[in-house]
Image (cartoon, rainbow, N blue to C red):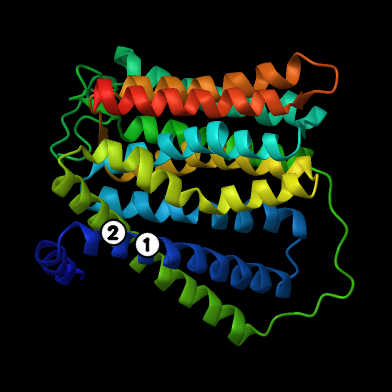
Amino acid sequence: MFDFLDTWLSAGGWWIAALLVIAGFALLLFGADWLVNGASGLAKRFGVSDLVIGLTVVAFGTSMPEFVVNMVAVSQHNSEIAITNILGSNIVNVFFILGCSALIYPITSTRQSRRFDIPWSMFAALLVLLFATYSSPSWLHIENLFNMHIDHPQWSDLGTFHWEAGSHAFISGVGGFILLVFFAIFLWHSIRNAKSGTSEENYTPMTLYKAVLLILTGLLSLVVGGELIVKSATSIARDLGVSDAIIGLTIVAIGTSLPELATSCVAAYKKNSDIALGNVIGSNIFNIFFILGTSAVIYPLPGYPGLELDALMAALASALVMLFVSTNRQHEIKRWHGAILLLTYTAYLTFRLVAVG
């Protein structure tokens, strides 16, 4: 469908690829916004509550850039982009975005975030670290469990979570299914325990035609944007002689995290800590449980050199957030905490580029 891009990229060089990456990010941002607006308008027309819209449509929409990039990468069997897009986005969300937000204004955590959201984020990150470090117990091997042979190459090794020099499966089909189960539990628990917000009395229902048009335009923009980013980022990696993993951890991860960056920094400037912190933590949970889980179910994701370090940093990010909000009476992420996050991110990127590659 997008074969002509290969011709452009091979003829134009890295600067054409860079322009296409920028165009792809623009399409992702606008497409996600159109999709959220259209889906929210359509949901309200059918009487769906603001709470459910916020936990589903809006949450999915703000993570749509990561989701689309992963679906395109998985369809092209580019596991390095698929994995580093998620791990890199989660690392960027905490170390860079939350660090910048805390420098703007200290971020105060709620009791709900300390008791529920941040622990769930830590659990998701630790689960990924476990997948990256250890092999699964034998009962997760589907063929052993059912004493049967599966010929399909995509599903024949569903239950294996091998890690050996970055060459075997990182998360397989069963691993992806487990992540999706935890996502369902998290979503159910969130809806069950959340408090309903006030409805908008002056809300003017969106016309059905406008809602459908926004949804279709948003979806088309997301598909095209995701294709542009993955193909162009891969081309840049080849031209510069770096791995797809480095491109995924930097250009792709930062680009797909632009919605979170804008949302959290503006919220911090307006002293709205709930949005600044909740946006980052919610995105990290959604990225691992839903996007990484869906990607692995579609096509098992093999590892790559440096995966354990990336997974460790994602887990460290969530642990630092919990440490910061638990060690002062105000339960804040203070400005000096933000400085530590930014310095840690800089040190990690430097080491990742120089020592691991």
Identify residue for label 2: 18
Identify residue for label 1: 22
Q: Residue at x 15, y 46 (%)?
A: 238
Q: Closest to the observer: 40 or 158? A: 40
Disc 2, SS? helix
Q: Quadrant of residue 322?
A: top right
Residue 128 position, x and y percent, is 42, 25
Q: Is residue 142 visible?
A: no
Q: Residue at x 16, y 63 (%)?
A: 9
Residue 251 position, x and y percent, is 36, 46
The amino acid sitting under disc 2 is Ala
Looking at the image, residue 143 lies above or below residue 34? above
Is residue 123 found left or right of 42 in the rendered image?
left
Tag 2–tag 1 contact (CB < 8 Å): yes
Disc 1, SS? helix
Q: Closest to the observer: 126 or 334? A: 334
